[in-house]
Amino acid sequence: MGIGLDHRLRQLQWPSRSVAVHPGYSVSGLTPVIEEINEPDFAKRLTGRLQGSFAQGKHEGSVAIVEAALTEGLERCAPGVFFGPQWTSKGRITLARPANVTRSKVLQDAAWEILIQANEGVDPFAL
């Protein structure tokens, strides 16, 4: 949906962008304890530790969202990029190009039609 929205914003020459964000594989068991918000039991902590080589805590997954919100110069980046972990499921946040299938115009149009249906038949960006 984000890629399709970015395409429409560019068509309309709006001074804004839509950039998708992928948090990676983020689990409660690797997230610091925050009373009444994240209090994983022993089993979740153990499962988190066993997945530690390819997973990260939710606090680390949120970094991609913050990076996307605060990064300057996104208006100059290539269309259809996203922020996500360097190694797909975890790692330093990078600007990446999504898989070819997600950049498909057919897929973008189908997702946009679902948005229009959910918006009671109104396309908020109709030309």
Image (cartoon, grey):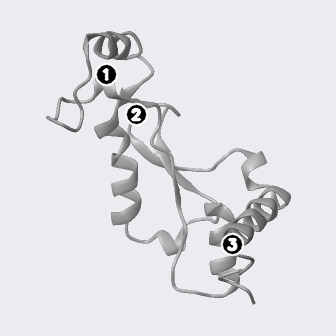
- Is label 3 in a helix, a strand or a loop? helix
Q: Nearer the viewer, mark 2 or mark 1?
A: 1
Q: Determine the residue positioned at 71% across, 80% down.
A: 123
The amino acid type, in three-letter code, at marker 1 is Gly
How far, Cα to Cα, is label 3 from label 1? Answer: 38 Å
Per the image, the residue denoted by label 3 is 7
Tell which circle, 2 or 1, labels the residue nearer the N-terminal end.
1
Considering only vertical position in the picture, is 127 above or below 58? below
- Residue 13: x percent and y percent? 63, 88
- Residue 113: x percent and y percent? 78, 67
The amino acid type, in three-letter code, at marker 2 is Gly
Considering only vertical position in the picture, is 46 above or below 26? above
Tell which circle, 3 or 1, labels the residue nearer the N-terminal end.
3
- Residue 22: x percent and y percent? 50, 46
How far, Cα to Cα, is label 2 from label 1? Answer: 17 Å
- Is label 1 in a helix, a strand or a loop? helix
Q: Residues within 10 Å of mark 1 (few under 14, many from 20)?
A: many
Identify the image quadrant of residue 112: bottom right
Q: Nearer the viewer, mark 3 or mark 2?
A: 3
Which of the numbered marks, if any, corresponds to residue 29?
1
Identify the image quadrant of residue 33: top left
Looking at the image, which is closer to me, 72 or 24?
A: 24
Q: Determine the residue positioned at 74% across, 69% down.
A: 117
- Residue 53: x percent and y percent? 41, 16
Q: Determine the residue positioned at 51% across, 75% down.
A: 75
Q: Where, quadrant-wise, is the C terminus in this rendering?
A: bottom right
Q: Are discs 3 and 1 less than 8 Å apart at CB?
A: no
Looking at the image, which is closer to me, 66 or 125?
A: 125
Find the residue positioned furthest to the front: 120
- Is label 2 in a helix, a strand or a loop? loop
Per the image, the residue denoted by label 2 is 91
